[in-house]
Image (cartoon, coloured by chain):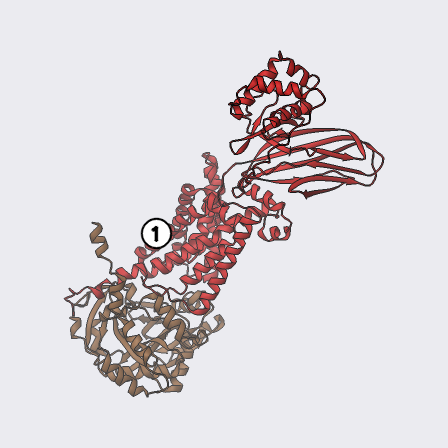
Chain colours: A red, B brown
Amino acid sequence: MTMPRPGKSICIIVGILLLLAAAIAAFKICVLHYSFSRSVNAELWVMECRIRFTADGGPVTARLSLPYEIPGYYLVVTSQTPDYTFAVQERDGRTFSVWQSPERRGRQALSCQISFIPDAGAAAAMEEPPETPERPRWPSGQKQFAEQLLRNLDPEGRLSVPEFVKALFKQIRKGDSPAVSVLFADKRRGAPFLQVVRNLLAMKKIASREVEGVFLNDKRRRQSPALMLEIYYGGSFHRYDPVSGAVSVQKDFIPLRIGDEPLFALSGGRQAALRFSALKTNISAAGLNRLRGSFVEHSWLMDIIGYELPISEQNVFKRLALLPLAVLLIVVVRNIIGLQSMGTFMPVLIALAFLETGLAAGLIAFLLILAVGLSARALLTHMNLLMVPRISAVVVIVILLMKAISVFSYAFGFTQGQSITFFPLIILAWTIERASMVWEEDGPGTMFRQLAVSLAACIPCYFILNNDYLQYLFFTFQEFNLVILALILLLGTYTGYRLTELKRFKPLVSSCSDHS
Amino acid sequence: MFGSLLNAFASPAALRNAGVLGMNRRNHDYIAAYNRRRYYPMVDDKLVTKELALKAGVPTAGLIGAIRCQHDAKNFMRMTENSPAFVIKPGHGSGGRGILVIKSHNGEEFRKADGSIIGSQQIYSHITNILSGLYSLGGQVDYALFEECISFSDVFSDFSFQGVPDIRIIVFRGYPVMAMMRLATRRSDGRANLHQGAVGVGLSIRDGKPRRAVMLDQPVTRHPDTGRMLSELAVPDWDRHLELAARCAEMIKLGYFGADIVNDREKGPLLLELNARPGLGIQIANHAGLRSRLELIGTLPSSALPSAAEKIAFAQAHFD
């Protein structure tokens, strides 16, 4: 077909619409972290941290180290602690939750919720190789034991780092070596234990670090932070369980602190205890977007987008969100294919009704109402009524019919019959009126053809309106409607042949025409 | 099977080469571009058209009167007592809907065109229907127009089943570009609408001689009801038809329209009505495309302002 040759102004408007749609969509994806994909149940982790301590009566400042970036997730921290000002602060590339209060006394409870929001866009940060560790300082007399231990473990210095670590932990667990007894005398667990291990590793010039974190696992409630040892070799840090000495395979470990910075710092209080709970919730894609958006400061944008509306109003907009697509289909059916339906947008309205009734039940009810309505209309024809009273009479008949269908289907146990009230009854009455006019003027053939076209346009409309993914997409990215608008404007300048005209005007190009 | 299905369709390029005008292009490039919305009442309102025609000296059927409100509906008897034959039309009707032709009456019994007799009560309810907007575009409130009945030329009587044979001439920028005669059939229920099954006979702009004929988009050679060879159709006073169409272009401000003309036995060609959205079936009846003709006219400079006679001469020289 001929390409449309739209005018300049239409090109400009279409361009503006497309740019606007692209800009809003880009904003939603990049800033609000919206997603095209609609995984029905996204996993959302919320970790709650509760901190209890006793305040000394003066100003209090509490600082909690927050988890590091995790590939595929980004973090949102909220806190509902009255009496404290709460802020998320960034320092030296780390983020902290900071609570402050000018004057507190007695037992205090702080809490914050850390949401791990799935984000396809976030990439893992590159790790820089650590510096070669400095020679450790041993307490007096311990250095020779340390050297002895290392010599025993690896006399020829040929063990690889993992092999050496394995041998070291094996030796520590056995505990029969005098060197181990001396070095780990009162440091059997926790941070002091790890410090000795790290000193030993440092003597072999192996970089290591201490990691404190929690397990993102909803079976572990009220967990204390756990310590882990990370050892660098082969280009990255490898996490070791300090108790077993084995490589940690627990993927749900979330580091809160790496290195020597304290996990929790408190001034103006004492006896702090930290407890973490993780909770996994399944969240709908739309809910996830709402959550994503709700943490962005530009919340007035969210109002415009419609997410802040009450749920019931949102559902209305969900239905409306796909209407432009259905209307576009009507434009295509009429102006590109060239089929005439009974009433321009009647198929869309009937399809809307089918959403409530279901397709099969809706079709049956529609045809039933139409058939009986046409018969009633035929009776009215003989009465020579004025137009408005006649259509009004048809409206009343349609209402009675709907009531009858409802009652009968209820009596026979079909629940779909109830939803028949969703049919737009004025539209039905007009459809009946129009159908009977077409029948009278152009014959039943034309009427059935137009009716068939209407239903043929109605059914794809129904499938468009009923498509969950499209609904999600157009509700989340309502700016796509601007794209639809642009398409409709472009179709408005389409001056090529309609599909039906290719058939209609075929006699004009067939050379073998003997009639003259 | 698929091949035969595909065979039923022409390629867009073939249609373009044949100069066929499609509905989208008609609406976009001609109706929307040349017909300003505010001038539509000049053709959609039959009384306005008639008044304009009277002022411009374009011959039309004589006006008896108009009934605008229900209260006056009962006065139709007084209005028509001096007219032996009359036609009632909806003022905003289209496609021949709601037209009632009374061939003769005695004040009580009214004989319709098909010979059946109706009473005054039925005429009264017909007027009521018209006033309530039954036949008007969009159901708007309408009025009933009373016209003198045209006494049709006998020359077409064998070519039409009841109904009014009329000649549709498409006029673009004052140039008559294509013409056809529409003949009612039993299938079309005595109406002269192509989509209802009337026969369309393409007429040469040059001399008014029949070129081709179609019924429901299919070629025909004889009238399906009377059996007359359609090639024997001869339109008297062809040039006067063209003049009438060209003068309509001067009286209304539409650039693209169809003029429907009927042939009266005594008065010759009379303007029946004008149409701002003439159909495209005329192309099939003529076995010729409108688009190439319209594009030729479109290239002519508007500054030259040739007279109607010059425009007719140009059209006759270029359009067969």
Question: Is B157 on the left-hand or right-hand side of A155?
Answer: left
Percent x, y of residue A344: 42, 58
Where the C terminus of chain B falls, by quadrant? bottom left
Q: Please name whichever residue, A318 or A341, is drawn nearer the observer in this view of the structure.
A: A318
Q: Please name whichever residue, B51 or A289, is drawn nearer the observer in this view of the structure.
A: A289
Question: Is A68 on the left-hand or right-hand side of A51?
Answer: left
Can the viewer see residue A360 in this picture? yes
Percent x, y of residue A391: 46, 57
B271 vs A510: above or below: below
Q: For the point 46% across and 67% down, which residue is it?
A: B140
Letter of the chain that mark 1 sits on in the rendering: A
Residue picked out by circle 1 = A452
Can the viewer see residue B160 in this picture? no
Q: Secondary structure at mark 1?
A: helix
Q: Please name whichever residue, A113 or B174, is drawn nearer the observer in this view of the structure.
A: A113
Question: Is B152 on the left-hand or right-hand side of B37?
Answer: left
Percent x, y of residue A50: 71, 31
Question: Label 1 is placed on what type of residue?
Answer: Ala
Percent x, y of residue B61: 34, 80
Question: Is A493 on the left-hand or right-hand side of B214?
Answer: right
